[in-house]
Amino acid sequence: MNNPTVNQTFTDQDFSNKKLTSKEYDNCTFTNCNFTEADISVVTFLECRFTDCNFTKVMMKQTAFRDESVFEDCKLLGANFSSCNDFMFSVAFKGCKLDYASFYGFQLKNTRFVDCKLVEADFTEANLTGSSFENCDLTNAVFKQTNAEKADFTSALNFDIDPAQNKLKQAKFSETGLIGLLRKYDLVIK
């Protein structure tokens, strides 16, 4: 059995097209690392921080992110979080590019998205209860059968959420954002 990697700092490392050697990273920091097409499947990250990392086409089957692992200014285009281990899943995203990411059917309770691009991200059947989307671009993001109760969309941009197809009880929206809830009705609001 592999020993966990604890309190390590990884800077400018190229993990692309590789399988990570350790099965557990605890309180580690990854800065400017390349995970393009890397296989981080069945790896557990506890309280880890990723800054300026590239996760393009990363494989994350049963990968666990726990104790609020933080992604800051990372590129996660097309990342499939729906294949991650959702037991105690806890992350925060700040300034990340999450275009085309999939959270299909995933548990994302109380997740913070701050200044992120989530163009065409898929939140179908996801549980976003209590999550927040601060200054996030949700252009063409998909919300179907999504539980977004108590979620905060007050400063989110370009979202299109159908209240008839999603749970939105006590979700927060700004007055200017209400058009994102009414778009399907093709109304002219002035």
Image (cartoon, grey):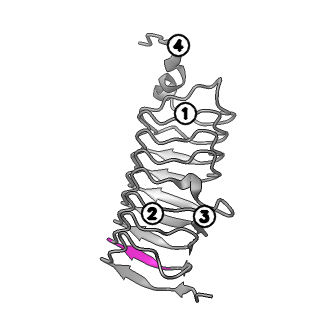
Q: Residue at x 41, y 49 (%)?
A: 116
Please state the extent of the stretch shown in magenta in the rendering: 28-32
Find disc 2 in the rendering and name its residue: 71
Task: Indicate yes or no whether the magenta region holds residue 96.
Answer: no
Instruction: Say which label, 3 or 2, has the lower sequence index.
Output: 3
Question: Residue 75 at x, y = what percent?
Answer: 36, 57
Question: Residue 12 at x, y = what percent?
Answer: 30, 77
Q: Is residue 35 left or right of residue 173?
A: left
- Compared to residue 150, the image places residue 62 above or below, namely below
Find disc 3 in the rendering and name its residue: 62
Find disc 4 in the rendering and name its residue: 185
Q: Secondary structure at mark 2?
A: strand
CA gap, disc 3 to disc 2?
Answer: 18 Å
Q: Residue at x 53, y 79 (%)?
A: 25
Q: CB under 8 Å between callouts 4 and 1?
A: no
Q: Amino acid at mark 1?
A: Phe
Find disc 1 in the rendering and name its residue: 173
Q: Amino acid at mark 2?
A: Phe
Location of residue 57 (image quadrant): bottom left
> Which of these two is toward me, 134 or 108?
108
Q: CB under 8 Å between callouts 3 and 2?
A: no
- Compared to residue 82, the image places residue 180 above or below, namely above
Q: Is residue 112 left or right of residue 158?
A: right
Q: Secondary structure at mark 3?
A: loop
Which mark is in front, 2 or 1? 2
CA gap, disc 4 to disc 1?
Answer: 18 Å
Q: CB under 8 Å between callouts 3 and 1?
A: no
Which mark is in front, 3 or 1? 3
Location of residue 188 (image quadrant): top left
Instruction: Say which label, 2 or 1, has the lower sequence index.
Output: 2
Question: Residue 151 at x, y = what percent?
Answer: 61, 42
Instruction: Say which label, 4 or 1, has the lower sequence index.
Output: 1
